Image (cartoon, rainbow, N blue to C red):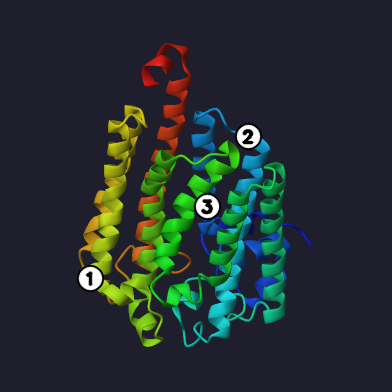
Amino acid sequence: MKLNFAMWQKALNVIPDVSKEEWNQLDVVSRWLIATRAAVLIMTFLSAALAGIFAFRDGVFQFLPWLALTFGLIMAHAANNIFNDFTDYVRGVDKDNYFRTIYGAQPIASGLMTKRQHLTYFAATGLIALLAGIYLIVINGWDINIWILLGLGAFFVLFYTWPLKYIALGEVAVLVVWGPLMIGGGYYVMAQKWDWNVMIASIPYVLGVTTVIFGKHIDKFKIDREKKIFTLPVLIGEKAARYSVLAMMVLPYLFTGYLIAIKFFTPVMAIVLLALPTFLNVYPALLKPKPESRPEGFPDGQGGWPLYYAPLAFGNNRAFGVWFLLGLILDVTLRLLPATANFWR
């Protein structure tokens, strides 16, 4: 079957909504990208990239372990997305025009795949992630800490959708996984040591990731409450959830400032302030309840309406994440330049 590179590009930017006829014409890579909601996997890649940069900065970077780490984390995230859709479908959540079936194709609910086919995708993707994890264990001499990291990863893949998401722990899981577990744990895989400053340095980025899942759960607030899915926004209330997202958008700047003050970062990390225009464009929407209908000019479908806060949070996180990543690259460069290296030690 002919490879559909245009669909690959589309699936990496949005969650495409395709018909059964279109699906049948797609190559297996396109189907996998759609089934895994590949557009959001960039968040995992950035976590792995940050772990690698911190390791490189400290002279402990190893390319093959980092490559295995990155590939394994992306596959684990992809497996979780597949299993998330499967679990919600089996539990009857993705029915009656539920959000997941509106903003993009849900492979089972949309009739694109059978449950067996969907589980096959999950098993194959999860197996690849597991093999990457085993490789990291073997090359690190069967380190018990890496076993623990692998076990925690498997736990969150299997149990995020149920029961964690149902008991207001889904958002906490995202905060733990995309920060300390991926970035701090990823650093450990290469350095064979824990660095608590790296853990703290993961917080500015992971808070942005958490705003995305928080935003999506605010978007689904009413219907989740009706279906008795007790996400954290349902538990604390819609208004408190919106202000929590605002706080999580501001805190990354404060954490970055703190890390500059203690000289873990060089002042070049102040470059993250260039993400402020995006935040200033987004924050007014979080001061008000979600509009009843799509605002004029707001994108519709495939990453847009009826999702509202989630796309706004994703855009803000992407802006901050890009400047944060660029700042770290410049930070490392300053530390390696002979003229400035001693000054930052």
Amino acid carrying label 1: it is: Lys
Q: Which residue lies under the disc numbered 3?
A: 44
Rounded to the nearest angstrom, the CA distance separating label 2 from label 1 is: 45 Å
The circle on residue 62 is 2
Place of residue 235 in the rendered image (x, y in percent of width and height, measured from the top left): 31, 76
Image position, residue 310 (x, y; %): 38, 64
State whether residue 289 appears in this view.
Answer: no
Give the total of numbered labels. 3
Query: Earlier along the polypeptide chain: callout 1 or callout 3?
Result: 3
Residue pictured at 32% horizontal, 46% vertical: 252
Task: Relative to 221, say whether 263 is above or below.
Answer: above
The disc at residue 139 is none
The amino acid sitting under disc 2 is Gln
| 87 up-or-down from 15: above or below | below
Residue shown at 71%/62% (left/top)?
Answer: 127
Q: Secondary structure at mark 3?
A: helix
Identified by mark 3, the residue type is Thr
The answer to whether 282 appears left or right of 320 in the picture is: left
Q: Say whether residue 167 is visible.
A: yes
| Outermost residue toward the top in this view | 339
Residue at x 37%, y 53% (from the top left corner): 208
User: Looking at the rendered structure, which numbered label has been put on residue 239?
Assistant: 1
